[in-house]
Every structure is written in C-alpha cells, then in structure tokens.
Image: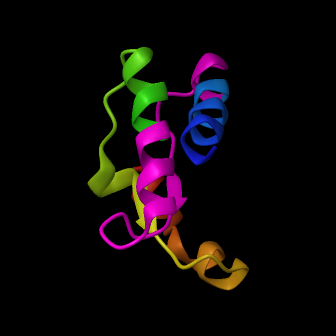
C-alpha cells in the first residue's frame, strides 16, 4: 500500500521532531505510484499540522538509484 507506507515513513520522521522533510518521488501527473505516495506524505504531515512546501521539498526522479541520488539539491533544503 503505497499511500500507507509513505504516510508511515513521513509520519515517523515528523514524530521524531522533523518539520522540513524532503521527498524524492515519481512524477505525480503521470505515475499512479507517485500520486499515491505523495498522498501519503500529505496525509501524514496534515495530520500533524505541518504545511508541506512541495515546490521546495518535493523533487521528481524516475525510480532508479542514480536519479534519486541527484534529484535533491541539498542547498535548496537547507536554506
């Protein structure tokens, strides 16, 4: 269950006190998996009162190691 898994992972991070959680995921417009996982991210954060800035903290990559590794420019997240 992609939605529940994403919600559990992000919920755990939020419960540990993290507020700025970056997500590398699939293209939400074209990928059912990406859309379901994104829904889980939003559900977990919304339940905890955390507003998610997708423009800043959601990066798109195809499902392979190399793209996932390079998808996130860490300077965007740390500033």
Left or right of 61, for residue 49: left
What is the quadrant of residue 7 in the picture?
Answer: top right
Q: Residue at x 51, y 40 (%)?
A: 21
50 w.r.t. 54: above or below: above
**Residue at the farthest bottom position:** 66
What is the quadrant of residue 28 in the picture?
Answer: bottom left
Q: Which residue is drawn at 34% across and 37% down?
A: 52
40 w.r.t. 69: above or below: above
Residue 27: % across, % down: 40, 70
Q: Which residue is drawn at 62% across and 76% down?
A: 63
Magenta highlight on residue 18: yes
Q: In which quarter of the image is the N terminus?
A: top right
Q: Which residue is drawn at 51% across and 49% down?
A: 37
- What is the basis of the colouring in this image? rainbow
Residue placed most toward the observer, 27 or 17 = 27
Magenta residues?
Answer: 13-40
Residue placed most toward the observer, 61 or 31 = 31
What is the quadrant of residue 32 in the picture?
Answer: bottom left
Residue 77: % across, % down: 45, 53
Residue 64: % across, % down: 67, 80
How many circles with numbers are drawn on the protein? 0
Magenta highlight on residue 37: yes
């Amino acid at each position: 269950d992609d939605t529940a898994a994403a919600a559990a992972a992000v919920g755990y991070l939020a419960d540990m006190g993290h507020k700025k959680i970056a997500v590398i995921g699939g293209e939400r417009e074209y990928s059912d998996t990406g859309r379901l996982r994104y829904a889980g991210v939003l559900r977990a954060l919304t339940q905890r009162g955390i507003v998610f800035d997708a423009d800043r903290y959601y990066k798109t990559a195809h499902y392979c190691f190399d793209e996932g590794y390079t998808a996130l420019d860490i300077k965007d997240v740390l500033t």
